[in-house]
Image: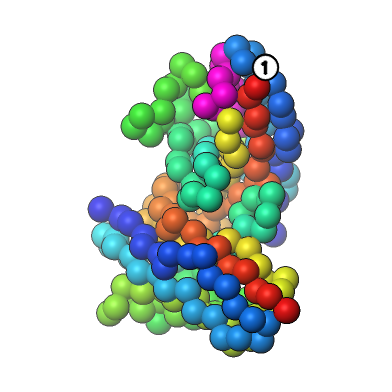
Amino acid sequence: GAVVSQHPSRVICKSGTSVKIECRSLDFQATTMFWYRQFPKQSLMLMATSNEGSKATYEQGVEKDKFLINHASLTLSTLTVTSAHPEDSSFYICSARVHTRSSYNEQFFGPGTRLTVL
Amino acid sequence: GNSVTQMEGPVTLSEEAFLTINCTYTATGYPSLFWYVQYPGEGLQLLLKATKADDKGSNKGFEATYRKETTSFHLEKGSVQVSDSAVYFCALSGQGGNQFYFGTGTSLTVIP
């Protein structure tokens, strides 16, 4: 099946620094990737949709200047949390959409990145 | 619009008990429906899916049937195990698959 990886799996940083999270599709090309945020004991909240070669589409309430998304290739999307603050601490999950006959409309999720901002 | 309403937890069951987690949805058109499972500290894993009405998704003893008449996709398992302890998310994907809508998740704890 389609595999999506994320790096790093955990990151701890100081307030004010920037953190980059990578999302890779390992065995398929993903024209569309999605970034979610999950607060403790809550569901996933879609932050943005990332399309290869174009600007990301952000959901309402998500600051595009704070959460920079780059989808430079068909297998890599990055999320950079700029000037991170403790309230940005969360679990960030990416997913990639696959369109095949057996996987129509399915998204494959990465294992997530736990960000802790001190 | 599209939305998913999921039974609130937490749910605690004894090993070998019967499990039902309710999920209903609101959607335009013909969505695909999914159940994802999240083990502690990990990302989401697809448990099962159904892409059209009356389809039954099944995996690892879990099953769910896409009921268009009741707009439901309830998750069931006849005999749960301790290893089934996790958070379960119901989700739908609208036509075109551009966005997933997740339920709030149901935490399941199975005790020996």
A102 or B100: nearer the viewer: B100
Marked residue chain, label 1: A
At a point 60% along the width and 12% down the height, the residue shown is: A16
Q: Amino acid at mark 1?
A: Lys
**Which residue matches tag 1?**
A14
Residue A101 included in the magenta stretch of the image: no
Q: Horizontal and vertical percent for residue B29?
A: 28, 62
Q: Horizontal and vertical percent for residue B71?
A: 31, 73
Q: Which residues are magenta?
A: A76-88
A85 or A100: nearer the viewer: A85
Q: Is B111 displayed left or right of A47 in the figure? A: right
Which class describes the residues within 10 Å of circle 1: few (<14), some (14-19), or many (20+)?
some
Q: Is B86 displayed left or right of B75 in the figure? A: right
Q: Which quadrant would residue A88 be assigned to in this image?
A: top right
At a point 29% along the width and 61% down the height, the residue shown is: B27
Q: Horizontal and vertical percent for residue B87?
A: 58, 61
Q: Horizontal and vertical percent for residue B12?
A: 57, 73
B9 or B94: nearer the viewer: B9
Q: Is residue A83 above or below residue A30?
A: above
At a point 33% along the width and 56% down the height, the residue shown is: B3
Q: Which quadrant would residue B31 be assigned to in this image?
A: bottom left
At a point 42% along the width and 47% down the height, the residue shown is: B98
Q: Is A69 displayed left or right of B83 in the figure? A: left
The C terminus of chain B, quarter of image:
bottom right
Q: Is residue B8 above or below residue A6?
A: below
Rendering colour mode: rainbow
Residue A25 appears in the picture as rendered: no
Q: Is B25 displayed left or right of A102 in the figure? A: left
